[in-house]
Image (tube, coloured by chain):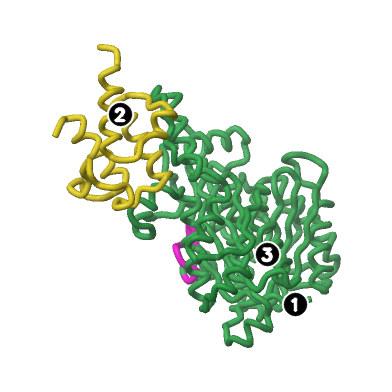
């Protein structure tokens, strides 16, 4: 089986609209969380989020194309453009046919849906905009990417809540590794800030009224985020042969289902996915775990228990970059995989910021508040979705 | 140009994001880059502009901007007086 290189990455998030800004913020421990701006949050019990600030869609999309693409799919295309440009792909018709696009999305274009339903239910407008359907569909990101680059190979979208883009990257990795395709553009995107959707999160009672403090004893819940992350994958040999810069490798992928509970995570399920990913990569220890680390009470202790169980007396350094870019749902796995790639590449492990107090139930070194300079060859990115569906990627330094 | 015609042309121009002076009853759909999805979007704009409901059968028959104007005129004329 072929080794799989990452030759392009793109990211737009609360930390900025490019990978450079993303990494500069992560390495500096800069938090992208602030007051909610996209809708009136005055009726919510929480007021903070990790939004893409200062974003103007018209800077990225022209004319009527803007009307046809929801914010979540815009983020997919913007991240895809950056990743593809970095990879320096010389497109041919043959390569376009042998390239896959696999994206993740959790709630798709639900802000568009919210606007349409508000017109219908609240303003008694009997008509809903006909562009609602093509804007809302969760595969819109994949479809727009295929049109953007003329990619005619296999393309689809995975939806597994908070693990969506980790599952997407894992599937794209398998396609490239097996030889089913010669290249893949993969990742995920999300843009969830409508009042209706935020009200549903409020009712779940898992969002922090304050900020995101993963693994800290006084953590108070997750902070919602948005954005997009995309990677270009290709066989390592082909990447080296064409002189592409290899940023890292996707080396292993593991999945599992908890078969337990819709919202309560299981340490056993998480551990099974981590062990499966390690086995797939052919390693039994590694230096860094980019945790799912949502900062809910239950996730963080459960994940910590799983990490300790998997690694025994060789527990790696851990951090949750959600403390800076928030929980971007369907974009989370992609943003965090990119964070992991960059951590190994720079030999700098991004911190868990906003951390204040040791939690004896966690029992991990979570790189509290300050990045660590550590040379690490192998890293892991964890994604554990509501519904008990887990996806874990193992990344190797180039 | 009737008031209705002017409002139809304006709705088309706004939906297609083109200057309104490019749109006349003679302008072919192709010239404005109007595809099937755009056409549906224009019908939505016309329904909102005139508060009418354009039946699916009538929508399928429309082949030109002139027919759009004529169709809207008929539906507006058929509206019950307020």
Taking the spot 44% from the left edge, 37% from the top edge, the residue there is A130
Residue A242 horizontal/vertical position (percent): 59, 86
Number of numbered tags placed on the structure image: 3
Q: Is residue A53 magenta?
A: no
- Residue A291 drawn above or below residue B59: below
What residue is shown with label 2? B71
What residue is shown with label 1? A2
**With A363 as the anchor, is A168 left or right in this view?**
left
Q: Secondary structure at mark 3?
A: helix
Estimate how packed mark 3 is, as few (under 14), some (14 to 19) or many (20 or more) residues with alpha carbons within 10 Å: many
Estimate how packed mark 2 is, as few (under 14), some (14 to 19) or many (20 or more) residues with alpha carbons within 10 Å: some
What residue is shown with label 3? A172
What range is drawn magenta here? A12-20
Q: Earlier in the sequence, mark 3 or mark 1?
A: 1
Foreground tag (3 vs 2): 2
* Both marks 3 and 2 on one chain: no
Tell which subunit mark 2 falls on.
B
- Alpha carbons under labels 1 and 2: distance apart: 61 Å
Taking the spot 51% from the left edge, 44% from the top edge, the residue there is A109
Residue B6 horizontal/vertical position (percent): 18, 35
* Both marks 3 and 1 on one chain: yes
- Residue A394 drawn above or below residue A49: below
Estimate how packed mark 1 is, as few (under 14), some (14 to 19) or many (20 or more) residues with alpha carbons within 10 Å: some
**With A347 as the anchor, is B46 left or right in this view?**
left
- Colour of chain A in the rendered structure image: green
């Amino acid at each position: 089986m072929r080794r799989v290189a990452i030759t392009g990455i793109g990211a737009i998030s609360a930390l900025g609209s490019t990978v450079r800004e993303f990494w500069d913020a992560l390495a500096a421990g800069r938090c992208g969380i602030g007051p909610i701006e996209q809708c009136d949050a005055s009726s919510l019990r929480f007021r903070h989020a990790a939004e893409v600030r200062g974003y103007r869609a018209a800077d990225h999309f022209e004319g009527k194309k803007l009307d046809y693409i929801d914010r979540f799919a815009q983020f997919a295309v913007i991240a895809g453009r950056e990743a593809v440009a970095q990879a320096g792909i010389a497109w041919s018709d043959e390569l376009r046919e042998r390239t896959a696009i696999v994206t993740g999305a959790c709630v798709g274009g639900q802000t568009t849906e919210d606007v349409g339903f508000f017109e219908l239910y609240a303003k008694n407008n009997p008509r809903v905009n006909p562009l609602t359907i093509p804007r809302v569909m969760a595969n819109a990101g994949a479809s727009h990417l295929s049109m953007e680059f003329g990619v005619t190979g296999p393309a689809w979208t995975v939806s597994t809540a908070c693990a969506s883009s980790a599952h997407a990257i894992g599937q794209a990795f398998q396609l490239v590794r097996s030889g089913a395709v010669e290249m893949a553009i993969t990742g995920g995107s999300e843009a969830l800030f409508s009042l209706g959707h935020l009200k549903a999160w409020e009712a779940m009672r898992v969002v922090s009224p304050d900020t995101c403090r993963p693994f800290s004893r006084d953590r108070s819940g997750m902070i919602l985020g948005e954005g997009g992350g995309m990677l270009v994958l290709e066989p390592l040999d082909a990447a080296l042969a064409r002189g592409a810069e290899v940023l890292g490798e996707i080396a292993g992928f593991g999945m599992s289902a908890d078969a337990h509970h819709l919202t309560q995570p299981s340490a056993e399920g998480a551990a099974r996915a981590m062990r499966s990913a390690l086995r797939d990569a052919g390693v039994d220890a590694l230096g860094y775990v980019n945790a799912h680390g949502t900062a809910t009470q239950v996730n963080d202790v459960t994940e910590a228990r799983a990490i300790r169980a998997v690694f025994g007396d060789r527990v790696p350094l851990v951090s949750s970059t959600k403390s800076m870019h928030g929980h971007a749902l369907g974009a989370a796995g992609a943003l965090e995989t990119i964070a992991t790639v960059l951590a190994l590449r720079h030999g700098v492990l991004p911190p868990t910021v906003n951390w204040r107090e040791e939690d004896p139930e966690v029992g991990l070194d979570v790189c509290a508040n300050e990045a660590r300079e550590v040379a690490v060859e192998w890293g892991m990115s964890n994604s554990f979705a509501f519904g008990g569906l887990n996806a874990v990627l193992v990344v190797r330094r180039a | 140009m009737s008031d209705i015609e002017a409002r139809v042309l304006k709705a088309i121009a706004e939906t297609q994001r083109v200057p309104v002076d490019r749109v006349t009853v003679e302008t072919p759909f192709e010239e404005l880059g109007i595809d099937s999805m755009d056409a549906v979007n224009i019908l939505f704009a016309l329904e909102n502009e005139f508060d009418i409901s354009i039946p699916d059968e009538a929508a399928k028959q429309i082949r030109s901007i002139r027919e759009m104007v004529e169709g809207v005129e008929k539906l507006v004329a058929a509206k019950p007086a307020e």
